[in-house]
Image (cartoon, helix red, strand yellow):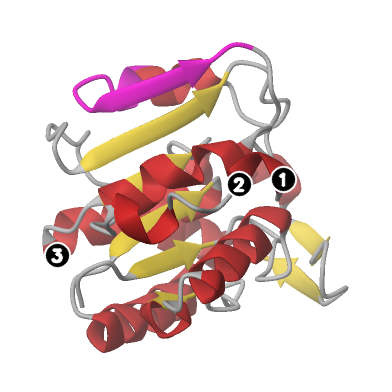
Amino acid sequence: MSGSILYIHGFNSAPASKKATLLVQVMEQLGLGDQLRVPALHHHPRQAIGQLERAIEELGRPLLVGSSLGGYYATHLAERHGLKALLVNPAVSPHRMFDGYLGTQKNLYTDEAWELTHDHVTALAELEVPAPQDPQRYQVWLQTGDETLDYRLAQQYYRACALRIQAGGDHSFQGFAEQLPAMLSFAGIGADLYQAIDFTAL
């Protein structure tokens, strides 16, 4: 489905996150709500990837939009299926960062409590792919003020891709709404559809 988007949220996040909510609002405003999927991902990577594979089947060849850990998932899936991906402050090698986080976790939006185990970390490691080399298929949006992830890791890993690095900001990506036209364009949605929307007012 041309112009379809699969949004992949981050670690302990949910479809209720601000970026996901904005994207749903805009796609519905454009009459394209049925071309967007924002699955509530299972905390275990293997189950999450299964959910995302099913969403890709439903949508055909969607643009994968991944935030944080979702950016890591999106990269794996984009490489597996030859899809386009737009990554927002993506995690690089997240399994290397989770050693100190093993144990009880809580989803920031749903309050669901769950256990982060060594099996989660192993499953994440299995998803690692060589650094993508295709600037046509990848856009990587980074903000240097990201307090959760060091943007330089993504800058290095995705150096062969189309990078957009903004000074300041934070992990949630400040000014996301104003960047949505670039995302819609990358997804193959015509500018004539969304030029009437004031993205600064969202």
Q: Secondary structure at mark 2?
A: loop
Q: Nearer the viewer, residue 162 or 190?
A: 190
Q: Secondary structure at mark 1?
A: helix
Marks 1 and 3, how far apart at CA: 36 Å
Instruction: Pick the quarter of the image with the N terminus.
Output: bottom left
Asked if residue 117 can be seen in this view, the reply is: no
Labels 2 & 1 near each other (Cβ < 8 A): yes
Q: Secondary structure at mark 3?
A: helix
How dense is the environment of label 2, judged by Cα within 10 Å: few (below 14), some, or many (20 and up)?
few
Residue 18, position in %: x, y?
Answer: 72, 56
Q: Which residue is mark 2?
A: 198
The circle drawn on residue 155 is none
Is residue 90 shown above or below 77?
above
Asked if residue 83 can be seen in this view, the reply is: yes
Tell me if 15 is positioned left or right of 105 in this view.
left
Q: Which residue is mark 1?
A: 201
Task: Give the amino acid at mark 1.
Answer: Ala
Is residue 24 shown above or below 182?
below
Tell me if 150 is positioned left or right of 183 in this view.
right
Marks 2 and 1, how far apart at CA: 6 Å
The residue located at (72%, 41%) in the rendering is 100
**Residue 105 occupies which quadrant of the picture?**
bottom right
Residue farthest toward the top in the current orientation of the protein: 167
Highlighted magenta segment, given as a residue range:
156-167
